[in-house]
Image (cartoon, helix red, strand yellow):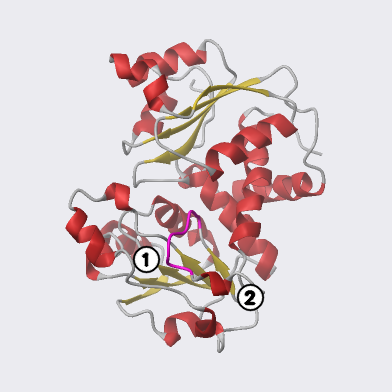
Amino acid sequence: MHPKSLVNIDDYSRDDIFRILESASRFKQQPDRDLLQGKVCATLFFEPSTRTRLSFETAVNRLRGRIIGFSDAATSSSTKGESLKDTIMMVGNYADLIIMRHHLEGSARYASEISPIPVVNAGDGSNQHPTQTMLDLFTIYETQGTLENLTVTIVGDLKYGRAVHSLIQGLSHFSPTFNFVAPEELHIPDKYKVFCDQKQIAYNEFTDFSPESINSADILYMTRVQKERFTDLMEYEKVKNVYVLHNDMLDDSKENLRVLHPLPRVKEISQDVDDNPKAYYFQQAKNGMYTRQAVICDLMDIEVK
């Protein structure tokens, strides 16, 4: 039996999601606890990260656990040719849980299948980012009072955006309606449209960032165009600033609308939006620590009261 891991948001049922959200709510009320005393968590970041790595490390520190690992693959033995398998097996000898970000799709699943300890996927290429989805769901629930029957407009890089792919699957339990806004070069992959069709989830596709796509939404989820995923920089230059949200574009939006973003932002949200009460992306990032505390404790079978 392999230890329980979180690799794909589909690893969580609807009940699992609500259990994690309930724990995250408790951590938001009281984040400093002694639940990981004597435990060691390894952060293996083969790809750059700021919010995800720091929120995981802060989550562990506030639970009195200890952190080992690296934030730059250039400082690891992978530069000497060590395989991912050997790295995972070696770290599994030292730590109680592995938090891993890797540029290859499927790397987290592979790691979970060989690891002697739980693995948390902190992003595997353009595939999945399940803890981002958990903090997104927590934030949506916090701002809307429900996860049910919401209209969610997702804007930008829908082809490579792993946070987008995970969010679609995570919200699939709650009868959403999606507005997908993307240029042709970055439209949502067909497999996610097939997924929506199979789950009988309504969706609309737009190439224009229209008032309709904004004003019908309960959640406006902005994303950056990910330069690091492009092999042709000319293609990136063509689409990098295709959609920019300005403050006046929110004038006719719903009162309950909240603007989210997995961050980092580049230019896709103008800074004049920051002071709008509908802007919620910095609070969203803060929620990452509480939800990651909840995920870590869940995977280590630690009860949160």
Q: Residue at x 34, y 61 (%)?
A: 158
Quick one: label 2, few (<14), some, or many (20+) residues within 10 Å? some
Residue designated by label 1: 156
Instruction: Characterize the local packing of mark 1: few (<14), some (14-19) or many (20 or more) Cα atoms within 10 angstroms.
Output: many
Is residue 192 visible in this depiction of the protein? Answer: yes
Q: What mark, if any, has residue 121 been given in the picture?
A: none
SS under mark 1: loop
Viewer-nearest residue: 8 or 263: 263
Q: Residue at x 46, y 46 (%)?
A: 129
The three-letter code of the residue at mark 1 reads Gly
Indicate yes or no whether the magenta region holds residue 216.
no
| Quadrant (top left, top right, bottom left, bottom right) of the C terminus | top right
Q: Residue at x 45, y 11 (%)?
A: 90
Q: Which residue position holds label 2?
A: 276
In this rendering, the answer to whether 283 lies above or below 200 is: above
Quarter of the figure with residue 112: top left
- Left or right of residue 75: residue 38: right
Disc 1 versus disc 2: distance between alpha carbons?
Answer: 21 Å
Residue 150 visible to an observer of this rendering: no
Residue at point 59%, 57% (across, down):
137
Between 100 and 297, the one lying in front of the other is 100
Of the two numbered discs 1 and 2 on the same chain, state the one appearing first in sequence: 1
Q: Quadrant of residue 195?
A: bottom left
- The three-letter amino acid code for the residue at tag 2 is Asn
Please state if 192 lies on the left or on the right of 177 as rendered: left
Magenta stretch, residue numbers: 262-269
x and y, in percent, of residue 3 in the image: 53, 24
On whether residue 263 falls in the magenta region, the answer is: yes
